[in-house]
Image (cartoon, rainbow, N blue to C red):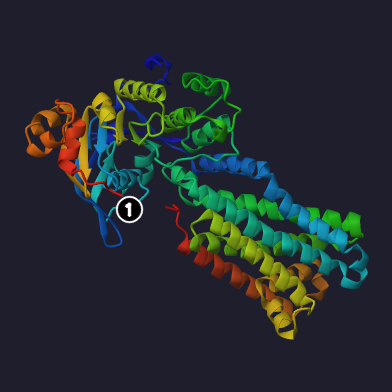
Amino acid sequence: MSSSDLPVVQSDYKNMEINIPKTSMAFAALLRADLTTQWRNRRSFVLVLLVPVIILISWKSVIDKLGGAFALSSCMTIGLVAIGLMGYSNSIARDRDKGIFQRLRVAPMPLWCIMASRLSVQLMMILLLTIIVFIAGYYIDHITIAPVGYALTFFTALIGGAVYLGIGQVIVGLIKNPETVNSTSRLIYFIFIMVGMFGEFGLLGEQIKKMAVWSPYGTVKHVISAGMEPGKWNGETSIALLVTLGYAIIFSAIGIKKFKWDSR
Amino acid sequence: MIHTQSTMDHQENNFVLEVKGLNVFYGTFQAVKDVSFEVKPGEIFGLLGPNGAGKTSTLSSIEGLIKAQSGSITVAGYNAAEKPRYARASIGVQLQFTSFQPELTVSEIVRLYAGIYGVAMPQEKLIDLLQAIKLEDAGSKKFGQLSGGQQQRVSLAIATLHNPSLVLLDEPTSGLDPQSRRQLWERMEAMRENGHAVILTTHSMEEAEAVCDRVAIIDHGKLIAIDTPQNLIDRHCNQPEVIKVSRRGKITLEDVFIGLTGSTIRL
């Protein structure tokens, strides 16, 4: 290849202008790329959205007994666990291992843009999950809630999602190897679902049932459920909300503190 | 809107890069020991050293990936510690272990980095860029589907998207076939002709001799020699440790390198 094939560059470097891109421009470019990546990553996409719908279908015959809010909040909580543990932590671990973050870090933009873009995509996933669970609940199980319940659930789902994103952040903060992150997040996902769901039903004993209620699974589910039925919001719900916020803050703080941009 | 500022106002001397008294520690281990050097515009500067000598740590400090414990780095007149975004905007980087999101196509990756570096990238410009790197038909291919040489070309094109005054290439030719390697050398030489400074790390002394105007040899974190390849050969050709490792009767840069850094294999 001759030099004439190359992109044009100026000969006098002292006259070269330094372009410091506006942060919003860099963030928009990152967000577009992260959304495209998420869209093309169909396996985790389907896993996150399909499992709650399948549960709603399988619970069709017992919805009257369980209650609409219980069913919807359980499905949303399972979806949120999947977003934080299976989706977020694995994508961060993979990109870190491939050196994608290192390449982004040498660019002239604030570091927070990289993670803010990733988190924005996950927040959109949470909103999408909430909408899909509502739609599936309506068409499959004919569950309807008050309009204010729909609006409140978007907020409670975001708070609940923050807990699991925080746990995902802790996992990638403590573990560098992407395969280990993958197996650990699957294990924790399994434990949350088993202890959360079966524990809540009392199938694992009274002690586990008490633990499940105040576990990240239990408090998130409680808050989401109460968001759907604001009339039933009580003192215990407020404590569950505080505990949920506490989990989100603690897990996020640990995850951010321990996080390394490079896996080597 | 893009904030622009000419480097002219900040240029106190004629160096694109000035590294002074750089010290880098990993815990108690000192990877870089009091390293100082300068790079001029239009110069290809080779950073040579055995495995673990401190090359990548030096380069990572310049890129802003790791924080030096002491010393200063000035890029295009900007102190990297005081104005990191300006310093980074003046650098084009091809890292040793770089990959791009495998789900994104080549065009999408170029657009992503154009956005990050504040470079407008209309469709015509994108096509021109892909043509320049002989990848006009690969714009819709995913990065992971490209060959090693094609990936290197994309990576180098992205490193120079924003027309930086300094380009850092960390072992860019490792794993490339001879044709791709020669092509990369020509691209580096073209950058030099256009006034860009290039810092290259490599384990290939043949490469350093072929393309570098000056080389610095780092060993155990210390800069032990810095000069043109020919001057280094001339200066050290009579040293017994260099003559001892010479294999072809004629002293090469590799002989000087091994003579200065020792024959022991580094892990």
Q: Is residue A178 visible?
A: yes
Residue A158 visible? The answer is no
Identify the residue at image location x=45%, y=57%.
Answer: A260
> Residue B50, percent across and down?
26, 43
**In x, y percent, where is residue B185?**
34, 24
- Seen at 51% across and 41% down, the residue is A26
- How many numbered dots are placed on residues in this image? 1
Taking the image as shown, residue B41 lies to the left or right of residue A22, namely left
Instruction: Tell me residue A89's x, y (percent).
Output: 58, 56
Give the quarter of the figure containing the N terminus of chain A: top left
**Amino acid at pointer 1:** Lys
Q: Which residue is mark 1?
A: B67
Near-viewer residue (A46 or B149): B149
Q: Is residue B34 above or below residue B169?
A: below
**The quadrant where residue B228 appears:** top left
Q: Nearer the viewer, residue B119 or B200?
A: B200
